[in-house]
Image: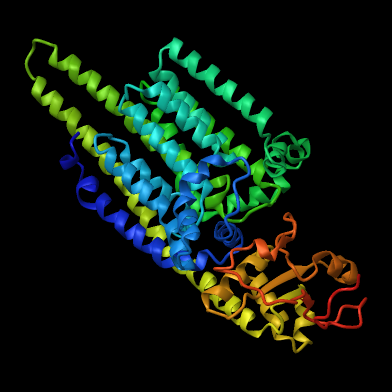
Amino acid sequence: MTRKQRWIGQQGEGFLWPIYLFVALYLGPERWLHTDSAYTLFRILNHQSLFYDRLACELLVWPGQLLSYLGAPIVWVMQSINIILPLMAWLAWTLTAKSPLRWLYFLVIFCGGSEAFYIGYSEIGLCTLIFITAIQWIVLDSKQLPLLLFLSITAVWLSHPAGVLYLPILALFGWQKLNPKQALTLGISLVSLMIAKQLIAPSNPYDSQLYGTLTNVKNLTQFRNLFSVNYLLHASWFFIPAATAIACFVVGLLKPWRQSTSIFFAIFLVDTLAAVLIYSQGDAHINMEKFFYPIAVIGMLSIGIYQWKAIGATLASTNQINGQPNGGNENQTQSHIESQTRIQQLISIPLWFLAFSMILGIQKHLPNYSERKQLLFDLVKLQPQAKLLIQQPSEEQVLNDDNNVAKIAIALSQKGSLWGLSYETAIASKLIDLKETHTVKIMSPEEIKDWPTTSSRIADSLFIGAPFEQPQPINRLNHRYFKFAKNQYFTPASTPPTTSTTSQSPPPQ
């Protein structure tokens, strides 16, 4: 089917990419002041590594790394990383004009929920883009398919742990396109690479913990009580992908390709179970960046499986009809073309419905990020010292205490986690052009109680950030973006119980 015969391709798809890019540019800066994105930006500005063993993510951040080395304004660095994934997806969509399944690129946008418009630094977004591009190569019968599959699977695996959910789908597609010798060679090459990688650079403890939840028997015995199950049952964004997967499975059972349909649906169910178990540890609450995004993509991909098989059946039937000597072939061929057109029209319905749903979802999230950004600006302006420590108080304490800094901290905690507050405030102070960098660290009650020990450890020449990261020497930070005055010690916002002073004198030796 030509592009002119596809209404959505001729009228709609091309306009969505510039709109998507504009929305990402407009909303991105506010999302970059939120936890993991702020942490990533902070490390890029300071020329630090941030991937662990997720080496493929270099494809996303190289523009920001280059601009930070050149000393470009922080907004330029931020936006260069913010738009790279939409640009890569747009380019891939443009280069696959002959593929009947190139509409799958929009799953990067639609299945990510409204968070997809706040691209920031999306490891799983990159993983999904590579996965969908691999499908295009398979459908187009690329001459270099074994090599392309090897590169795709490797990049998916080295982008994010959730990439393992995509690998069975690539295996299903590739198995039907490769001959036994090619499949065996590809399998041996991938296994050898994975073994070598684990021997040279084993998975970091965080990723190992994610995989470990799959073997936790307790999660299976208490499955109904897992908060991730309750989360998925009430996740309205997941309704369309789940309903699509079920509908395509039921309809596919009535078709000659029922075996492929059943295998694909079984993979969808297994991936859903894996995502629920891994998510049960409660590490994240943004579906785009974690394990529910891949299964949403796989659910919508059920339409692609149906379409791919329908196209194959149509071509086979058409060839058979054209090879028959009897009359009436033109009418039957036209009937097959009209049937294929109806399939394409059916595909456009959920895509546009998803598009409108995601756009409406932006309005719900925008105030949250806008208010958080303003709270960060207020905090760095109000804090009495450049390097401030705060013990997160309860809401009751804040109501009885005339402490504006603590009130802002509570307000920030209601709009997201505070583990990245050190990075968020440091970046915010640069964005509002303070003469010196301000940073705020939320401390545990145990650290506050043992303040003399903590103070002697961090001294005046260190920057402390997330709990999983060691304090960093200030002189190693990029002074183009972060400047601390001399003799600036981390100081509690209020007097801790175990110390009698909060002055900025040097810590006890």
- Residue 361 appears in the figure: no
Residue in view at x 13 percent, y 16 percent: 322
Determine whether 206 is above or below 428 in the image: above
Of residues 287 and 127, the one drawn nearer to the viewer in this rendering: 127
Determine whether 474 is above or below 246 in the image: below
Taking the view exactly as shown, the residue that stands out farthest to the bottom is 402
Of residues 339 and 481, the one drawn nearer to the viewer in this rendering: 481
Quarter where residue 473 is shown = bottom right
x and y percentages locating residue 271 in the rendered image: 57, 36
Quarter where residue 161 is shown = top right
Judge left or right: residue 17 versus residue 239: left
x and y percentages locating residue 168 in the rendered image: 52, 28
Determine whether 422 is above or below 103 in the image: below
Residue in view at x 58 percent, y 22 percent: 191
Judge left or right: residue 402 versus residue 33: right
x and y percentages locating residue 143 in the rendered image: 32, 21
Of residues 253 and 152, the one drawn nearer to the viewer in this rendering: 152
- Residue 434 appears in the figure: yes
Q: Quadrant of the N terminus?
A: top left
Quarter where residue 411 is shown = bottom right
Q: How many marks?
A: 0
Residue in view at x 39 percent, y 32 percent: 135
x and y percentages locating residue 203 in the rendered image: 67, 37
Residue in view at x 90 percent, y 71 percent: 452
Q: Quadrant of the C terminus?
A: bottom right
The chosen color scheme is rainbow
